[in-house]
Amino acid sequence: MLHWYENLYVSERASKKLKRTISRINRGKLTPEIYVLTFPSNDKNIMDIIPANILLQKTLRRRCPKIIGLAKGREDALELMQTIIMETYEQTGGFCVKEYLGDKK
């Protein structure tokens, strides 16, 4: 089962069919051009960008960290990541997205 951040960050391009896209990802359906941003899978990363179609694999799906963002296209995902990192830096003076969003309600 996938875990979604309560206040999911969504790029403008991905927001048009948001409910449908999330439903398709949850049901394990193909979602071309969709990328998810997750909490980091290791201590060396700030966060991870994963093509949503990778989550069709059951083992990767079970091991997927909490999804904090959704974007359409790799460039869109990079821009969304930049937005999240800049917000984190402005609020905390650091780059630990997991701590910032984990404390944010």
Image (cartoon, helix red, strand yellow):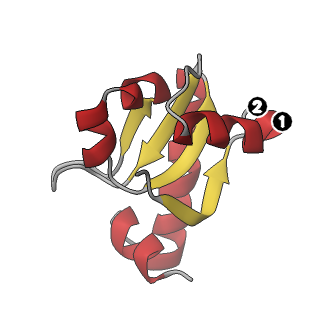
**Helix, strand, or loop for circle 1?**
helix
Can residue 12 be seen here? The reply is no
**Helix, strand, or loop for circle 2?**
loop
Q: Which label sits on residue 16?
A: 1
- Disc 2 marks which amino acid? Arg
Question: Is 66 left, or right, of 24 in this rendering?
Answer: left
Q: Which of 48 and 28 is in front in this view?
A: 28
Residue at x 59% of width, y 22% of height: 31
Residue 3 to residue 30: above or below: below
Q: Residues within 10 Å of mark 2 (few under 14, many from 20)?
A: few
- Disc 1 marks which amino acid? Lys
Residue 82 to residue 77: above or below: below
Q: Nearer the viewer, residue 82 or 60?
A: 60
Q: Which of 101 and 59 is in front in this view?
A: 59
Q: Which label sits on residue 90?
A: none
Q: In which quarter of the image is residue 49?
A: top left
Give the farthest residue toward the front.
27
Spot occupied by residue 14 in the image (x, y as percentages of width and height): 72, 35
Give the farthest residue toward the right.
16
Q: Which label sits on residue 13?
A: 2
Label 2 to label 1: alpha-carbon separation: 6 Å
Question: Is 50 left, or right, of 75 in this rendering?
Answer: left
Spot occupied by residue 90 in the image (x, y as percentages of width and height): 53, 70
Q: How crowded is mark 1: few (under 14 residues within 10 Å), some or many (20 or more)?
A: few
The reply to whether callout 2 and callout 1 are in contact (CB within 8 Å) is yes
Residue at x 33% of width, y 39% of height: 61
Quarter containing the C terminus? bottom right
Residue at x 45% of width, y 58% of height: 3
Of the residues tagged 2 and 1, which is closer to the observer? 1
Residue at x 30% of width, y 33% of height: 58
Q: Nearer the viewer, residue 5 or 22?
A: 22
